[in-house]
Amino acid sequence: MSSSAIPEALDPALADRVAAFTSDCSSTGSPIACHQLAEFKSVVHSDFAGSFKLYYDSCYSEEKGPPSGSQQGIVTSPTGARFYPPSCFNLSRQYLAGRGVEKSDSGAYRALERSCDQAGHVGACHHLGVMLLSGGDGVRKQEGRGARCLERACGMGDVTSCHAVASVLLSGGKYPGAAKEGGDEKERRERIIEALDKGCKGGYAPSCFNLAGFYKKEGDQVNFNIYKAITEGLVKSGNGSGVGKLQGGLNKRVG
């Protein structure tokens, strides 16, 4: 992209930044600069074919020479190549949406796997886990591995992943570390509570709601009242995430 391709309506400071990472991407191949250029192409120009190519190159870079520019966030693969995990994550989203490329579950899977397994990108681990729980076109269902990916994302603070882990456990599916389908019920109970509590403490209202329901089912009125009150507080204030899923049905479903 030449400087003449930068929209005149852009703030001058932003235009300067765009020109800088355009130059860095073309001259040095910096994965971070190319990622920034891809975001600009996608968001401002809706040039998804252009952003796809840049994300792909930054995700599957085979550059092994002396690093150039900022290396913050750059990961070295087992082959010694450096790549940028957020590019892999954005690449997966374009594969799933069919933006700039034909839709491909398997293409998204490979990008998410690279970003999660080799770099621990929290968003990639969450989406990889969700994908593995159900499988897809060219993607084999692997419930145990999917749950492990979600647990990893939960451990990094992603509250929706914590909630998803609990959902796997509540459904009776195989969970990480279980020797067989179903596993030990005492451990299952502890892990359900732990996952929902993490989600709730992170402000994810559906986790608080489900934990209240879990304790109600067990006949634990004290803990039921605690988590029901937390859920109602999040819904009333609107401060928690996932609140929209509960508004209008809280008392009917939990009270």
Image (tube, rainbow, N blue to C red):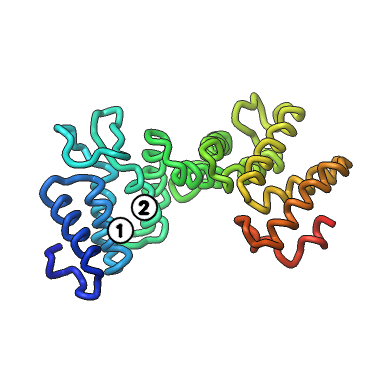
Q: Quadrant of the N terminus?
A: bottom left
Name which residue type carries label 1: Glu
Closest to the observer: 145 or 245?
Answer: 245
Q: Residue 39: which numbered mark, if any? A: 1
Q: Residue at x 24, y 63 (%)?
A: 14
Q: Nearer the viewer, mark 1 or mark 2?
A: 1
Local crowd size for mark 1, using a 10 Å CA cut-off: few (<14), some (14–19), many (≥20): many
- Give residue 113's position: percent from left, percent from top: 41, 39
Verify CB contact (< 8 Å) between mark 1 and mark 2. Answer: yes
Closest to the observer: 31 or 187?
Answer: 31
Residue 189 placement: quadrant: top right
Q: Is residue 158 rendered to the left or right of residue 174?
A: left
Q: Residue at x 56, y 47 (%)?
A: 134
Q: Is residue 77 rendered to the left or right of residue 215?
A: left
Q: Is residue 135 rendered to the left or right of residue 246?
A: left
Q: Is residue 15 rendered to the left or right of residue 135?
A: left
Give the structural element (helix, strand or loop) at label 1: helix
Give the structural element (helix, strand or loop) at label 2: helix
Name which residue type carries label 2: Asn
Q: Is residue 229 above or below residue 174?
A: below
- Give residue 165's position: percent from left, percent from top: 62, 41
Residue bearing the label numbered 2: 90
How many marks can you see? Answer: 2
Give the mark, 1 or 2, whose residue is nearer the N terminus: 1
The outermost residue toward the bottom is: 9
Q: Residue 49: which numbered mark, if any? A: none
Q: Residue at x 70, y 28 (%)?
A: 183
